[in-house]
Amino acid sequence: MVTPVVNKIRFALLVVLALASLQIGSLGHLRTPTASALTNCTVSDLSIDADEARFLQLINQHRQANGVSPALTMSVELNRAATWMAADLTHSAFSHTDSLGRDPWVRMAQCDVPGNIQGENIAAWYITADDVFPAWRDSPLHNQNMLDSRYSYIGIARVCCGSQGQWFWVTDFSNAGTPLQTAPVLKEPTITAVTATNSTTLKVTFNDNATSEYGFQYERKTGTGGTYALVLTGNALTGAQQGWFWPNEGLQPNTTYCYRIRAFDDKVVTPYSNEVCGTTSAGAGLQAPSGVSVAVGDSTSLKVTFNDNATTEYGFQYERKTGTGGTYALVVTGNALPGAQTGWLWPDGGLQPNTTYCYRIRAFDDKVVTAYSNEACGTTSAGAGLQAPSGVSVAVGDSTTLNVTFNDNATTETGFQYERKTGTGGTYALIVTGNALPGAQRGWLWPDRGLQPGTMYCYRIRAFDANVASAYSNEACGTTSGGGLAAPSNVNVVKGSSGTLNVYFNDNATTETGFEYSRRVGQTGNWGVVITGNALPGAQQGWYWPDSGLTSGTQYCYRIRASQNGTFSPYSNIACNTAP
């Protein structure tokens, strides 16, 4: 026999986990709200926080996975009842009966909850949605409420704090209600593929399923057994769209990497996406070009030289941008070059006078492209007859003199400006304004005298006429001798084979007993002595030290100084490059 009032069907308290479940109401009997509706049911805020929104996502996923419909919708009335009850639990006994002595159906009536089939779950001590949801799911009575197909509306509330600092959760259910407008649920991305672009790059393709994210966290681990680490925090993406990709560069060839991604806003992060792994290509035979440098041709052309390190390429892509802040664009796609050889030249013509251009190059075959080469920039000359000097180099004269040699490329200049700075970090100042030189000839010499012994100086030169000055020459540095113990100079770092950088320098000392070769990682690392080498014969140019066993894709910086029985010269200039 069915009674004419709402029946209490299920009631349970799980003491260990501090959970409780109750379902009230029965089919076929509409509950009539009492005349005291909304009495003792006032709450100040019906909005839901990120964890309450997360719980709505979890319970609807749970219902869908178990073939239960409909998806639950937040209800104004149920949210009012749940919020009031959660706040009441912070200062009363842990029970479905509130501090006013009301059972859940009386409370829901006074909170103006419509419908005739209703239920309630309560819990204590669980802080987040991901804490409380599995506890209710694994409890039969609570799970029965969450999977009841007769419910179509839900109220969700969590409130802190009880007398011991505990959080309380309340979910109220009904088959009727007024929809509560909520913020969009933040959904996790879905990774669809990880594919090799080249030997050092993987392309991570994914679907953005969120519409209100602030950004994404991209995490990576090496190998399937590695540990995930945050690699990049990226911006929000437009809408919830498919087919986004992130090119992860600077990786090791023939190495497996795994990825996961999650979205975040100002309050919460989503669960992680699925994990997908990929392996970079082996890279044998298709290495990136290196040693890119740019020299002035004339006012409308620059000469781009580079080393070809590939043996199986189909061709090269030559890219250029205007100024250091410009955007790279493909200028020409060139043929393959024979073997892997150094010193190739590409003359880039049709440029604007007195303008800076930057270049990068990469090789390609029928499947992949290499990483880009280093970037190098150069500036066209000011115009016909007024090209910048080039080939500036500095040699030691004596302890107070440096000999600055250069090539004069101008034919219409009225003079030259010779500028100098002390050390690589100093500020350039005009030292002398010199006369025009006859024709455009190579090998001019300017002896700079009256300098400090054992001190590094750097130089640059430009031509001028009555109207304009040319671009500056290249910069070159040298160190005055210090009684036979002059510092090395013109340190330059060139990429060698994989994991090797060749450090070139000039030996300016004649009485040294050895050299200290120091290295640091990147621009801000700590210096450390890598090797202490023997003395070199005489003071000669063009020595080099191959530094091997380096980590590919990592930048290293070098400096060198001569030593003599515990006395040291000043350090050379600092030079850096990225290990291939």
Image: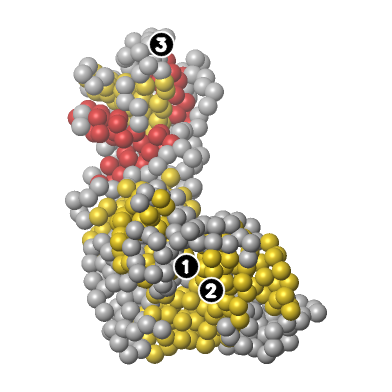
Q: What kind of element bears circle 1?
A: strand
Q: Marks 3 and 2, how far apart in space?
A: 83 Å
The quarter in which the C terminus is drawn is: bottom left
Provide the secondary structure element on which disc 2 rests.
Answer: strand
Is 47 rendered above or below residue 355? above
Screen quadrant of the N terminus:
top left
Q: Are marks 2 and 1 in contact (CB under 8 Å)?
A: yes
Judging depth in this view, the residue of 106 and 72 nearest the camera is 72
Q: Return the residue nearer the eye: 309 or 134.
A: 309
Residue occupying the point 64% across, 73% down: 461
**Which percent across, then down, holds residue 448?**
62, 68
Residue flagged by tag 3: what amino acid is it?
His
Q: Position of residue 354 (x, y in %)?
A: 67, 78
To which quarter of the image does residue 256 belong?
bottom left
- Name the residue that disc number 2 marks: 393
Distance from disc 2 to disc 1, alpha carbons, whole Å, reads 8 Å
Looking at the picture, which amino acid does disc 1 mark?
Asn
Give the residue drawn at x 42%, y 23%: 159
Instruction: Read off the residue under disc 3.
Output: 91
Q: Is residue 349 above or below residue 513?
A: below
Task: From the image, tell me which residue sits under label 1.
Answer: 490
Quarter of the view holding residue 447: bottom right
Nearest the camera: 48 or 1?
48
Q: CA distance from mark 3 to mark 1?
A: 77 Å
**Cβ atoms under marks 3 and 2 closer than 8 Å:** no
Q: Residues within 10 Å of mark 3 (few under 14, many from 20)?
A: few
First of labels 3, 1 by sequence position: 3
Task: Determine the residue positioned at 28% across, 69% down.
Answer: 498
Q: Position of residue 314 (x, y in %)?
A: 33, 86
Which residue is found at the position 35% from the left and 51% from the top?
565
Answer left or right for 387 relative to 143: right
